[in-house]
Image (cartoon, rainbow, N blue to C red):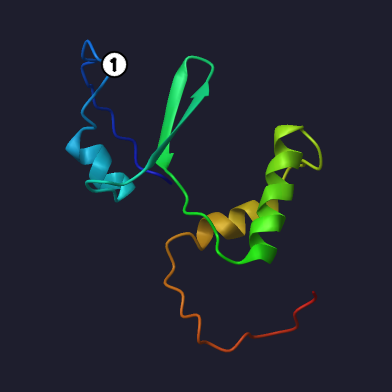
Amino acid sequence: MMQTIVEHAKLTSKGQITLPKSIRQALGVTTGAQLCFELRGDAVIVTRAQAEHNDPAIGGFLALLEADIRQGRQLGVLPDELAQAMLDNLQQPVNLDDEIEGEVAL
């Protein structure tokens, strides 16, 4: 389960805030990092901005996926078992050089 951190920041006359240290640390951002602000109802969600992909195939796929999501197409709920497996493995270390066990269907 994700930790909850509640901090307060004061808005300056120029519309600026200082991101509290605990939030910067939780997001893993330092000076010069780019952040993304998403407005959901009356809540603002702050995340690290994702870097652009250099691989044209991945970039094209992500652009197509983003367009579908924005238009509400091809969206569905993850099966409960898959969602739970993802949560269970969230903090597990991964070695990308390990051999894949079992069958893989592509």
Left or right, 85 with respect to 17, comes to right
List x then y, in percent, for residue 58.
65, 62
Screen quadrant of the C terminus: bottom right
Please indicate, yes or no, whether residue 74 appears anywhere in the rendered image: yes
List x then y, in percent, for residue 61.
71, 57
Q: Could you say whether the residue bearing mark 1 is in a helix, strand or loop?
A: loop
Seen at 55% across and 64% down, the residue is 54
Left or right, 7 with respect to 92, comes to left
Q: Camera-side residue: 83 or 25?
A: 25
List x then y, in percent, for residue 88.
52, 59
User: Is 75 above or below relative to 106?
Assistant: above
Seen at 34% across and 36% down, the residue is 4
Q: Camera-side residue: 44 or 17?
A: 17
Q: Camera-side residue: 76 or 39?
A: 39
Q: Residue furthest top?
A: 13
Number of other residues with Cα within 10 Å of mark 1, as a class: few under 14, some 14 to 19, many 20 or more: few
Q: Residue furthest bottom?
A: 99
Q: Amino acid at mark 1?
A: Gly
Quadrant for residue 35, please give it.
top left
Seen at 44% across and 45% down, the residue is 49
How many marks on residues? 1
Please indicate, yes or no, whether residue 79 appears anywhere in the rendered image: no
User: Is 28 above or below relative to 45?
Assistant: below
Quadrant for residue 82, please give it.
bottom right
Seen at 44% across and 68% down, the residue is 92
The residue identified by callout 1 is 15
List x then y, in percent, for residue 6.
28, 28
User: Is 66 above or below relative to 6?
Assistant: below
